[in-house]
Image (cartoon, rainbow, N blue to C red):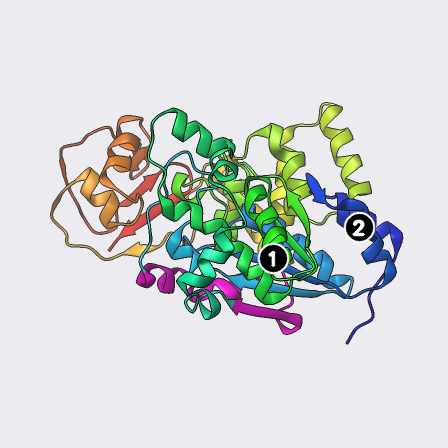
Amino acid sequence: MSKVNTDPQKIEALLKRGVEEVIKLDHLRQRLLSGERLRVKLGIDPTSPNIHLGRSIPLLKLRDFQELGHQVVFIVGDFTGVIGDTSDKDAERPMLTPADIKKNMKDYVKQAGKIIDLKKCEVHYNSQWLKKLSYAELGAQADQFSVAEFSARENIKKRLDAGKRVSFREMLYPLMQAYDSVMVKADVELGGTDQRFNLLAGRELQKHYQQNQQDVIMGPLLEGTDGRKMSSSWDNTVNLTDAPSEMFGKIMTVPDNLIMKYFILATRVDLTDLKGVEAQLLGGANPRYIKALLAKEIVKMYHGDQAAVLAEEAFNKQFTDKELPEDIEEKKIELRSWKLDDLLVELGLTSSKTEARRLIEQGGVKIDSQKTANLAEIQVKSGIIVQVGKRKFARIK
């Protein structure tokens, strides 16, 4: 077992970088300085197949704890994912099926392993204990909270005030996340600011089970490529599984005002060095140049140095020199007349016909480098290149 690092400077960086709130700060600081080996928990629900950069924020914080010698605990929410957390939603999240969750979580641990050292990490699936709970236990847990406490949450209150439905299922979710903390005996839990109620519920339930109450570290939420909160449902994510060139291209579309936020939250470039980067931005440096540094750093984190260099070269060829990318994926489809929206869905360039029609009408679709707003049928031939937006291509075979 490795010795716990109690370097005060590293502890302060742990408690401040990418941190919005700590409960309880002084208590946690003293435990870290004491050399006590803490159990640090992070749970993620596999509500989509990909872990994105927004979720890398608590994973990076988990790695920070790991590097100081603490025991990190990663929980895959294969049970809570079915139920659905609406902490950050303005509408009820639909229930997923167990089959959906099984498919989504296929590579989840492997993806988390791009950030944390899985050899030194406890990995759990919360169905192991949540499936076994009885009505008696649920009743005892639910008794620790009032309906008023739940309904006072900002997004729940908004929905109630607007006359929107709030399901009883949503009230159970915080209990489940809290019980995870009980089962792994967490000393610290990590999460976003949108999960404040759930994280505090963990403290209350640990108290009910006569455990020491966990401290909590909450990080900010990261905006996606369109400036809204990064979310798979909005198709604005940068995924850890994205190919290097796709990852680089997505970062280059991030709004300029988010460059430093991405550097601080989604990388581990030294904060002293980042002061120099920020000074360049404030001094009038071209944001595109700084953003390229950011994109290169993030690609390097997940794919290595060489991949980052090649991704930058490919981006410059495509967008500076206006060349088509060299690695356009070939797609086999029937050579016949296709409605363009059907074609885009068939090629996997859009997720739905609605999205396809919107992009066509906005002029975001090209056939062999020529823009088309034609919704009627087109004759598909072998070798033509279909492009959607700036980064999605398919060559028909």
Q: What separation in Å lies between label 2 and label 1 (alpha carbons)?
A: 20 Å
**Viewed as shown, does residue 246 lie left or right of 63?**
left
Residue receiving disc 2: 27
Q: Secondary structure at mark 1?
A: helix
Is 321 above or below relative to 203?
above
The residue sitting at 84% across, 53% down in the picture is 30
Whole-percent x, y for residue 180 in the image: 55, 61
Tag 2 near tag 1, CB within 8 Å: no
Give the residues in magenta: 98-124
Pick whichever, 279 or 352, lies toward us.
352
**Viewed as shown, does residue 68 lie left or right of 387?**
right
Residue receiving disc 1: 208
* 114 in the magenta segment: yes
Is 56 above or below relative to 374?
below
* Residue 330: assigned label: none
The residue sitting at 52% across, 65% down in the picture is 109
Quick one: quadrant of the C terminus? bottom left
Pick whichever, 5 or 117, lies toward us.
5
Please name the amino acid that badge 2 sits on. Answer: His
Pick whichever, 33 or 278, lies toward us.
33
Whole-percent x, y for residue 342 in the image: 19, 43
Whole-percent x, y for residue 267 in the image: 67, 48
Whole-percent x, y for residue 152 in the image: 51, 33
